Amino acid sequence: MPKLSSRMLSHRVTVLRSTKTSDSQGGYTEALAPVIGQLACRLTDSKLANRLDESGALVADITRWLYAAPGTDIQADDRVDVGGAIWLVQSADDQPDRVYRKAFLLAEQ
């Protein structure tokens, strides 16, 4: 089985996940906490994707793909910090050949 070359993983990003902490009043507060401090990955260039929202208005989303080693702890609803820009992870799956994990990112607005 082919392996993902470390030379291909030229980007470093931080993976953030939402955590809940008790607020001592019966509720909780939510905050983002790092899951992976410096994830070695490959990022595609940003792309503009047009779609229609619920009201039928045209919306432009900024998207990109992230590739990392298979089994990397990145999942849907995580956030990825790319040089201070925060991206929402829409989906993340190991590919069938288990050569890499692929995550679809959406720019947060």
Image (spheres, grey):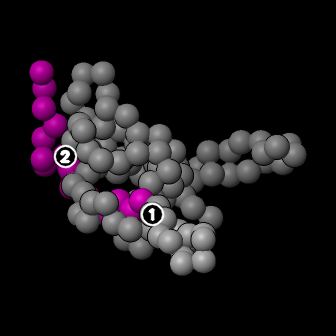
Residue sitting at 21 percent across and 41 percent down?
A: 69
> Vertical placement of 16 versus 44: above or below?
below
Residue 51 seen by the camera: yes
Q: Upstream in the sequence, badge 2 or badge 1?
A: 2
Check disc 1: other Cα within 10 Å, few if <14, some if 14-19, many if 20+.
Answer: few
> Vertical placement of 87 versus 98: above or below?
below
Residue 33 figure quarter: bottom left
Residue sitting at 54 percent across and 58 percent down?
A: 107
> Vertical placement of 102 versus 16: above or below?
above
Q: Amino acid at mark 2?
A: Met
Q: Is residue 101 left or right of residue 49?
A: left
Q: Viewer-proximal residue, 17 or 22? A: 22
Q: Is residue 60 left or right of residue 79?
A: right
Which is closer to the viewer, label 2 or label 1?
Answer: 1
- Which disc number belongs to residue 8? 2
Q: Position of residue 100 (x, y in %)?
A: 25, 35
Residue 17 figure quarter: bottom left
Q: Is residue 100 left or right of residue 1?
A: right
Q: Residue 9 magenta-drawn?
A: yes
Q: Position of residue 66 (x, y in %)?
A: 36, 47
Q: Which residues are magenta?
A: 1-17
Q: Position of residue 106 (x, y in %)?
A: 53, 52
Q: Residue 5 magenta-drawn?
A: yes
Q: Amino acid at mark 1?
A: Thr
Residue sitting at 46 percent across and 61 percent down?
A: 18
